Image: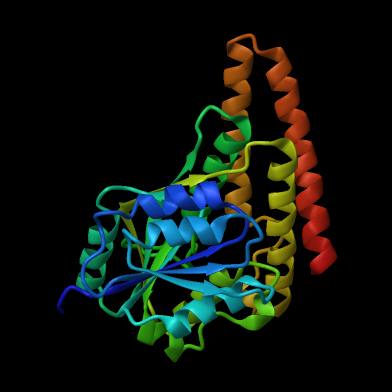
């Protein structure tokens, strides 16, 4: 297979500063035939930021206000011309070899989904560090043999455009979230392999405040509750799959012991209270939409 052309898809809303970081991290990585499709629903200065960067990057700007991530991504995929759709969040930063690694992976596995690795930043913030643990625990839960996964996370993932449309794209009914998880499960059910390639690295800027952290988890739980409602019984995950729950407990105790060993009693107590709040929010969010 020749080296494929890429259509990098970034959906954004009112995060122009983070979007600037995301797009500039792709400078010098695009080849002829590549494109960066920015689907924008913003009311801030995002259009001006994109217009400025379009002088240096092969950006296709799409203004689109319909609700729901599936609609945004499907809109971009319809405009795409590249062989491979690369899902790249507006709060991510690509590593220097990001796009070249994606090309190599798809040349090696031309009819597969490729999942890259994401690091949570900025490090040293409790909410960010917990999200990093949760992401790694999710990867461990979804892992199968030979570097394959049960599904994928669209922060840093890519799929052949023909394969995306062969199986109907993202489902419009998943407008609450988890649209990537649902598509991944659907693809794997059809025999498509999802490979994890740890050389495809991006940094993901997490929520750094208590409100942002808890709001994000409420959204995750709600989308997962709705997802379980439509999945076949054999694929339903529950509030937290047992394997992931055990990994979360281990992550919690490792950090709690570290706080206590260093005499950080205030942080240790706050950490316990945070996890109690997190458990309540996830159970409530899941049950409300299940």
> Residue at image x 69%, y 20%?
267
**Which quadrant does the C terminus fall into?**
bottom right
Query: Residue 40's x, y, as percent?
Result: 57, 67
- Left of 79 or right of it: where is 13? right
Task: Answer yes or no: is residue 143 visible.
Answer: no
**Above or below, 260 relative to 5:** above
**Residue 110 is drawn in which quadrant?**
bottom left
**Above or below, 218 relative to 150:** above
- Left of 130 or right of it: where is 1? left
> Residue at image x 63%, y 62%?
42
Query: Residue 10's x, y, as percent?
Result: 48, 64
> Residue at image x 68%, y 74%?
175
Foreground pick, 264 / 253 = 264
Query: Residue 239's x, y, as percent?
Result: 72, 58
Q: In the displayed orientation, state which residue is furthest to the left.
A: 2
Query: Residue 29's x, y, as percent?
Result: 25, 57
Foreground pick, 25 / 176 = 25
């Amino acid at each position: 297979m020749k080296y494929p052309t890429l259509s990098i898809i970034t959906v954004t809303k009112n995060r122009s500063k983070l979007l600037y970081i995301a797009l500039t991290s792709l400078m010098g990585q695009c080849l002829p035939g590549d494109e960066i499709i920015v689907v924008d629903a913003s009311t801030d200065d995002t259009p001006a930021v994109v217009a400025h960067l379009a002088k240096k990057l092969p950006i296709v700007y799409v203004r689109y206000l319909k609700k729901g991530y599936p609609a945004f991504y499907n809109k971009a995929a319809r405009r795409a011309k590249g062989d491979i759709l690369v899902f790249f969040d507006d709060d991510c930063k690509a590593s220097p070899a990001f796009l070249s690694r994606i090309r190599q992976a798809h040349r090696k596995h031309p009819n597969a989904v490729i999942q890259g690795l994401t690091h949570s930043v900025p490090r040293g913030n409790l909410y960010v560090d917990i999200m990093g643990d949760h992401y790694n625990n999710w990867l461990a839960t979804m892992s199968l043999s030979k570097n394959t996964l049960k599904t994928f996370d669209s922060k840093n993932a890519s799929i052949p455009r023909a394969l995306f449309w062969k199986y109907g794209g993202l489902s419009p009914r998943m407008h609450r979230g988890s649209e990537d998880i649902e598509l991944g499960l659907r693809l794997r059910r059809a025999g498509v392999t999802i490979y994890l390639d740890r050389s495809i690295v991006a940094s993901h800027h997490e929520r750094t405040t208590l409100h942002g952290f808890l709001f994000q988890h409420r959204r995750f739980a709600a989308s997962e509750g709705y997802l379980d409602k439509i999945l076949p019984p054999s694929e339903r995950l529950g509030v937290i799959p047992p394997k992931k729950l055990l990994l979360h407990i281990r992550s919690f105790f490792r950090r709690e012991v570290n706080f206590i060993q260093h005499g950080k009693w205030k942080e240790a107590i706050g950490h316990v209270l945070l996890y109690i709040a997190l458990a309540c929010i996830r159970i409530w969010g899941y049950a409300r939409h299940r």
